[in-house]
Amino acid sequence: MGLFSSSHHERSGHADPPADGREVSRPGVPALASVWSDGLGRVGSRAAQILLIGVVAWFVIQGLIKVNVIVIAVVVATILACALRPVVRWLKNEGMGNTPAAITTFVGSILVLSGVIYVVVESVVSQQSQLAQQAVSGVSKVQEWINTLPFSITNDQIQQWQQKGLSTLSSSSSQISQGALSGLSAVSNFATGFILMAVCLFFFLLDGPRIWRFFMSFVPEKHADKFEQAGQGSVKVLGHYIRGTAAVASIDAVFIGIGLVATGVPLAVPLAIITFLGAFVPVVGAVVGGIIAVLVALVTKGVTTAIIITVVVILVQQIEGNVLQPRLMGDALSLHGLVILLTLAAGSTVGGIAGAVLAVPMTAVAWHWVKVFRGRGAPLMPEDIAKREKKEQKKAEKAARREEKKRQKRLQESA
């Protein structure tokens, strides 16, 4: 019977499992698990996951590009709301209600933004042809000076380098000009984006904490602390970044503008505004603004004035990088210079000028989230803890004085 039983199992193709319970694969047919358990299988599974993530990210980016007006408006409103949040908090501490404080801050910020846009359009766009002509003339003078050097550099090589260096600028300028000359479409897109940004900014200022709590309601409880820490830190990063950048840009524009006016360089106001706007594009913007100022000085006032403006620009940028940014921005932009350059390249490729301006603060926020979730956030130093305690003590004393004033006022009214 046992012999028959054994033969039956052999004919049916089934073998008895071993006594120790281990799984035995059929001869010549490897188990599915063994295919993915070796080194090549693990690499293949990871490659498949990376490809899938890449495809999903590509579709997401393409979708965001299609609605870039909405995306840029929401991102700009978020950054401005983070920068203006202390103003709303200060007004509320002074006794103003939440809604009046939000409305006051919103109206003031819109007036300032409208003024900045008007000044830029009036001073820069209206004189862009003169600026471009002076800059091109300056490049030509530099080319003539290079021809006098004792190096073996031919005129053809200089023209080739010049063409390579200006090709991207020319294409971008043509695209900007076409967009500016496209009439109602460009005006409509700008107006739509500005209005949408203004609406989002108002609601972020009015109900920012409540909107954040709404999103936090979808976060699992085990991750709530990390999300809360990362979100609060993001508000600080964006606020410090935009306030610090605006302060640094203003100081750069004022001192470089003073240097231009003192040396008698024409178009000083447009050049100072270009310096101010360029500061919002880290590393690259300040360099480009300084080069344009030096080229205009070279054409209009000669080599000596150009050297003076070069010294002024370098001195201002050194003070900015070594003194102003560490004090005004703190750790808001704790990114390596190479990371900033790569981020600018990627942002400008995806979103043009707006992408170049917004890429760096968004990358700083993303890096902050990475540090929080990896548990690598910078610990508080003793002086930071003492500063925080002192600030909290002053805040409590101020609140107590305010309550005392309200109590005295109620007593007087009741009397």
Image (spheres, grey):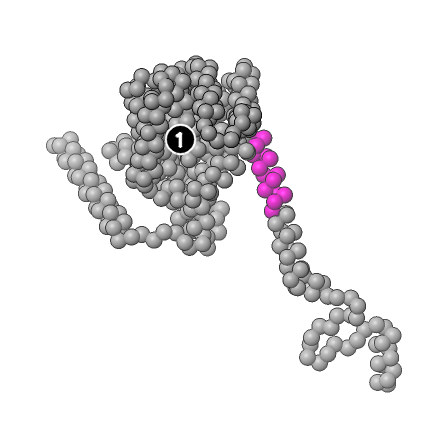
In the displayed structure, does residue 406 sit left or right of residue 134? left
Is the residue 21 above or below the residue 371 in the image? below
Q: Secondary structure at mark 1?
A: helix
Q: Position of residue 40 (x, y in %)?
A: 67, 60
- Dividing the picture into quadrants, the one containing residue 297 is top left
Q: Position of residue 104 (x, y in %)?
A: 32, 26
Q: Residue furthest front?
A: 150
The N terminus - image quarter: bottom right
Type of secondary structure dominating the magenta stretch:
helix
Which residue is found at the position 75% from the left and 70% from the top? Answer: 25
Label 1 Cα neighbours within 10 Å, binned few <14 / some 14-19 / many ≥20: many
- Dividing the picture into quadrants, the one containing residue 3 is bottom right
Residue 62 is inside the magenta segment = yes
In the displayed structure, does residue 387 sit left or right of residue 349? left
The residue singled out by tag 1 in the image is 286
Q: How many marks?
A: 1
Q: Is residue 303 visible?
A: yes
Q: Nearer the viewer, residue 132 or 34?
A: 132
Which residue is found at the position 73% from the left and 73% from the top? Answer: 24
Which residue is found at the position 52% from the left and 29% from the top? Answer: 153
Residues drawn in magenta: 53-67
Residue 190 is inside the magenta segment = no
Residue type at numbered disc 1: Ala
Q: Nearer the viewer, residue 277 or 14?
A: 277
Q: Position of residue 211 (x, y in %)?
A: 43, 38
In the displayed structure, does residue 160 sit left or right of residue 11? left
Which residue is found at the position 73% from the left and 78% from the top? Answer: 18
The C terminus - image quarter: top left
- Dividing the picture into quadrants, the one containing residue 43 is bottom right
Q: Nearer the viewer, residue 9 or 113?
A: 113
Q: Is residue 112 visible?
A: no
